[in-house]
């Protein structure tokens, strides 16, 4: 009975929704999916190497956006510079964090990693909130990507198309590096057996630092990409981290490609929900997570531990 | 300690003495506290102490890190407030409803999460608590940002007037002690021994023939029921339920309480709750810096002070606290 009512509601909604509206929401979903993919990819890479879940990931995403903002207002460097410099700066900060804090809990129960990085997230977010309050700061996108392009079925804001395309390229590039290069082979080997890889003369501690820095840099990159679309806000990381965790649970952390795919697909589904049942758009990812857990407790691409 | 027959007999008497001394100290503190501090502050701290004890039952004795425990506290609070204010039920019944809601939600969340281990369990609880928190923002009965205000404090018992400070204090203490005793009995029962065995080596517990998942789920539901009790009691003390009761930051704070006091100690969460609630009260004027300080304490505890206050005392004295 209820489903027919909802079905009728959906049909009704369908009739009223223009294709422009539908595709706009789908695009927004895809953009969010790109951020989910970049963030869960970074989490997966870090987890694979360090065996910790980086709770500070959302905070680094936020810092990435803020560094872009600082670069513009303090150094006069625009979007394209920020896209390169912000991940490097935040990544360097991440390396520092790994060397000074995270290193000391290696070998302890994995839960301590979660607690430590959670504390870190509180510190970073609290500092930015104390300084900037909770309102958003506007950040201009690159002028070259302003404007719309007519695709026939919809008008595509060029910047948004760029975010999706660029994120997809970065994700696939990361996957290629890890799965298809010598460096990636070292990385995977060190994940499996760090002692043995060390015996072969590979500097594993440095690799761990760089891996953490790289994962954090991916989060910062997502932050820069997000800055012109959403405003730069201290809470932007805290808002996204729970969704990213759900994405990771759905995808399972065993697979790089799996986490990328899951990120994009869940973003898209979230966008679809926004069109047909907006009240549920906040929670749809969590509901999907619950369903996946019932069917496959290890996630879609996960391996049993 | 009669329920721990497997404990080495040489250690047991000393632990017994320590346990009795600690309990006497706790009761003495409960008696003295309202004369030394603002009674409503103490009652608040007791509610959060009970919440932290419930959380610690999982992390300390089963090894499950629930990173979204505020959902049980908050839903217990909301349902208790709704029952007392809209349905006009007395405080005791409303609190029981809060407990039932905590247990029911725990059963659902537990059934979803319990098969996953370690960090996955933690991440699932983060996501589920976010789901509950979004639900509470949108559901009409929670009244969104306003919350449920001026909840009546009507007691079932004829001569108990919960609007007065002294009876309310005794009432809160009684509930706290019941909850605390429930945790104490659970931890020191054969059931608790099996939980600890699961924490230490889950595979071995499975190979010994224990249905590990069911034991974990039972402990989880017990913890969430107590979290619901804590949230519901908070409503009767503070006369309101709000979004901060289901918020993610509360989930973080309850972890901090247990961590400061000592994970896996009986009295640690109580000490930690007093520290954290005091921190919030005295540092409230510094706004967002409270978050920064909490983060720093988190990092410091994980890096330097993993046993916590009570854990260190217990180690120095070789007591079981």
Image (cartoon, coloured by chain):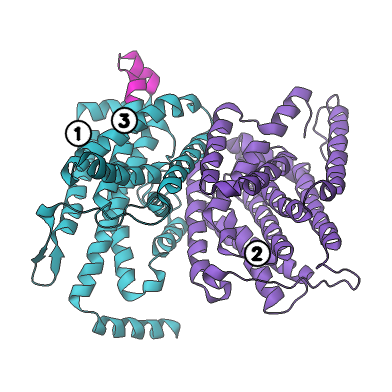
Chain colours: A cyan, B purple
Where is residue B11, by image quadrant?
A: top right
Q: Are marks 3 and 2 on the same chain?
A: no
Image point 86% across, 46% down: which residue?
B32
Viewer-nearest of labels 2 and 1?
2
Q: Which residues are magenta?
A: A194-208
Marks 1 and 3, how far apart in space?
25 Å
- The answer to whether residue A206 is magenta is yes
Query: Is residue A136 at all visible to an observer of this figure?
Result: yes
The residue under label 2 is B77
Q: Nearer the viewer, residue A123 or A12?
A: A123
The residue under label 1 is A180
In the rendered structure, find residue A208 and report the number of the disc placed on it.
Answer: none
- The secondary structure making up most of the magenta span is helix
| Residue B255 as seen in the image, left or right of residue B180 | left
The residue under label 3 is A92
Indicate the secondary structure of the residue bearing disc 3.
helix
Marks 2 and 1, how far apart in space?
53 Å
Write down the chain letter for disc 1.
A
Residue B99 in the image, given as x and y percentages of width and height: 70, 63
Q: Does A224 appear above or below A99?
A: below
Q: Are marks 2 and 1 on the same chain?
A: no
Marks 3 and 2, how far apart in space?
44 Å
Q: Are marks 1 and 3 on the same chain?
A: yes
Where is residue A275, by image quadrant?
A: bottom left
The crowd level at tag 2 (other Cα within 10 Å; few <14, some 14-19, many 20+) is many
């Amino acid at each position: 009975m209820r489903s027919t009512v909802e079905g009728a509601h959906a049909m009704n909604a369908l009739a009223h929704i223009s294709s422009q509206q539908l595709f706009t929401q789908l695009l927004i979903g895809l953009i969010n999916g790109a951020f989910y993919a970049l963030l869960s990819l970074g989490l997966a890479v870090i987890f694979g190497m360090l065996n910790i879940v980086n709770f500070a990931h959302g905070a680094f995403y936020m810092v990435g956006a803020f560094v872009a903002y600082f670069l513009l207002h303090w150094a006069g460097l625009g979007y394209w510079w920020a896209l390169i410099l912000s991940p490097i700066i935040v990544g360097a900060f991440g390396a520092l964090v790994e060397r000074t804090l995270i290193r000391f809990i290696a070998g302890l129960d994995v839960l301590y990693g979660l607690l430590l990085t959670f504390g870190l997230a509180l510190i970073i977010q609290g500092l930015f909130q104390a300084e900037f309050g909770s309102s958003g700061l506007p950040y201009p996108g690159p002028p070259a990507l302003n404007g719309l392009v007519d695709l026939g079925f919809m008008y595509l804001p060029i910047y948004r198309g760029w975010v999706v395309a660029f994120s997809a390229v970065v994700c696939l590039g990361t996957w290629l590096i890890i799965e298809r290069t010598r460096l990636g082979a070292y990385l995977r080997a060190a994940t499996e057996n760090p002692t043995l890889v060390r015996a072969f003369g590979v500097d594993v501690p440095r690799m761990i630092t760089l891996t953490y820095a790289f994962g954090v840099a991916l989060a910062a990159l997502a932050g820069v990409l997000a800055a012109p679309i959403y405003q730069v806000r201290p809470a932007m990381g805290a808002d996204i981290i729970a969704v990213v965790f759900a994405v990771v649970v759905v995808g399972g952390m065993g697979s790089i490609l799996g986490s990328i795919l899951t990120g994009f697909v869940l973003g898209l589904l979230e966008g679809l929900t926004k069109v047909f049942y907006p009240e549920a758009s906040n929670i749809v990812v969590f509901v999907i997570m619950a369903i996946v857990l019932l069917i496959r407790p290890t996630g879609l691409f996960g391996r049993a531990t | 300690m009669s329920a721990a027959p497997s404990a080495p007999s040489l250690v047991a008497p000393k632990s017994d003495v320590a346990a009795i001394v600690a309990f006497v100290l706790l009761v003495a503190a409960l008696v003295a506290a309202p004369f030394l501090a603002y009674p409503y502050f103490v009652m608040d701290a007791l509610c959060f102490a009970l919440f932290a004890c419930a959380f610690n039952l999982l992390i300390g004795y089963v090894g499950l890190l629930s990173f979204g425990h505020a959902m049980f506290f908050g839903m217990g609070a909301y349902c208790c407030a709704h029952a007392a204010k809209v349905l006009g039920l007395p405080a005791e019944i409303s609190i029981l409803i809060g407990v039932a809601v905590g247990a029911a939600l725990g059963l659902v969340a537990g059934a979803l999460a319990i098969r996953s281990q370690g960090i996955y369990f933690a991440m699932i609880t983060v996501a589920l608590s976010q789901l509950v928190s979004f639900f509470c923002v949108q559901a009409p009965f929670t009244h969104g940002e306003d919350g449920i205000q001026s909840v009546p404090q009507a007691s079932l018992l004829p001569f108990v007037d919960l609007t007065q400070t002294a009876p309310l204090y005794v009432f809160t203490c009684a509930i706290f002690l019941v909850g605390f005793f429930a945790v104490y009995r659970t931890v020191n029962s054969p059931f608790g021994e099996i939980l600890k065995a699961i924490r230490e080596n889950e595979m071995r517990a499975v190979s010994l023939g224990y249905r590990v998942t069911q034991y974990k789920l039972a402990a989880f539901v017990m913890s969430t029921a107590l979290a619901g009790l804590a949230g519901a009691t908070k409503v009767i003390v503070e006369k309101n339920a709000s979004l901060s009761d289901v918020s993610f930051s509360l989930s973080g704070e309850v972890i901090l309480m247990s961590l400061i006091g000592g994970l896996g100690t009986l009295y640690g969460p109580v000490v930690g709750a007093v520290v954290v609630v005091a921190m919030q009260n005295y540092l409230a004027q510094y706004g967002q810096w409270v978050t920064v300080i909490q983060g720093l304490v988190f990092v410091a505890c994980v890096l330097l002070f993993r046993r916590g206050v009570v854990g260190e005392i217990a180690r120095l004295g070789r007591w079981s606290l």
